[in-house]
Image: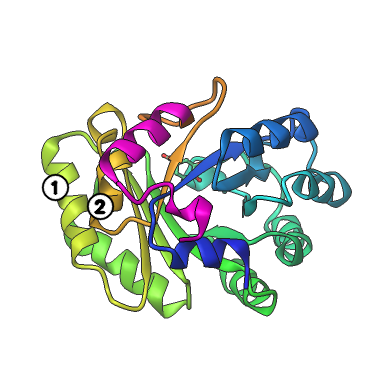
Amino acid sequence: MSTMRALLDSGVPLVAVSFYDNDCARTAKEAKAAGVDVAELRVDQFERTDVEHVLACAAEFGDLATLATVRSRREGGGWGGSEQQRLELFRALAPHVDAVDVELSSREIRDDVIAEARRHDAVVIASYHDFERTPELDRLRAVVAEAGEVGADLVKVSTMANSREDVRRLATLLTNAPEDLGMIVIGMGATGTLSRVFFPALGSRLTYSFIGDRPTSGQLEFGETSRLLRQFYPDFDRRRTGG
Ligand SMILES: O=C1C[C@@](O)(C(=O)O)C[C@@H](O)[C@@H]1O
């Protein structure tokens, strides 16, 4: 079983931090010392994306649960190569990471990425992002249904929260989740920041934070996120002791 699957099964809120390829050995060491649960490797934003380099970086994070993300430009990422190259990277990474994140909109490669991840027992996160707005509930529900259909373990819905109403809509989506699909729901932007701390209480399985100086809109720093989660979730530290 992947480390990530075991962590997810614990039911305790988990914190992910995104990492890039600026000195992987050092940042991996810092991540472990800080107590990061999930290291998201934002391969789309790496300086170098040749397989050898990417795998060497992933290996540095090997003691942590690792999540490989090669985000398309269409969904706010920095991937500048072809879809075929992106698929090759996912294929190379799948045996060496705990989880992969692929956008539902990446239709050309999505099903192959999912099949490859499954072959290696890597957790599949099917993702959906809207950096401008939070769509209507029907649209969000359709996203969740599609993630279930493609065989994801988790669906991640990350949308810009421009109002409290948007946050409520995301909360409604989360609390009406299907039983057989894990949910990660994030309201981006300042109005959405509270979702990063309180949506785990509604069932969102992973919250994203940052270490250093590259936050995504509305993210809280890792230390601050952990402090708040420890304050609001008495069982937060249970995932460390396995109790
Ligand atoms: O999609 C997500 C969520 C995110 O965009 C956030 O808002 O926390 C951060 C990304 O690194 C991650 O892949």
Q: Could you say where residue 199 lies in the image, as x and y percent from the top left?
A: 27, 49
Q: Is residue 221 visible?
A: no
From the image, state whether disc 2 or disc 1 is nearer to you. 2
Q: Which residue, as the protein is rendered here, is positioned at the far right?
A: 52
- Taking the spot 32% from the left edge, 33% from the top edge, the residue there is 228
Q: Residues within 10 Å of mark 2 (few under 14, many from 20)?
A: some
Which residue is at a point 24% across and 45% down the rendered structure image? 134
Find residue 56 and report its horizontal and vertical position in percent: 84, 46
Q: CA distance from mark 2 to mark 1?
A: 14 Å
Q: Which residue is mark 1?
A: 168
Examine the residues drawn in magenta and state their main secondary structure.
Answer: helix
Is 54 left, or right, of 185 in this rendering?
right
Tell me the quarter of the picture where residue 154 sits. Answer: bottom left
Residue depicted at 25% across the width and 52% down the height: 201
For the magenta stretch, what is the residue range?
A: 223-243
- The numbered disc on residue 201 is 2
Q: Residue furthest top?
A: 213
Q: Quadrant of the C terminus?
A: bottom left
Residue 124: where, in percent of width, then height? 54, 67
Q: In the drawing, what numbered circle is on residue 225?
A: none
Quarter of the image where the N terminus is located = bottom right
Neighbour tally class for label 1: few under 14, some 14-19, many 20 plus, Cα within 10 Å: some
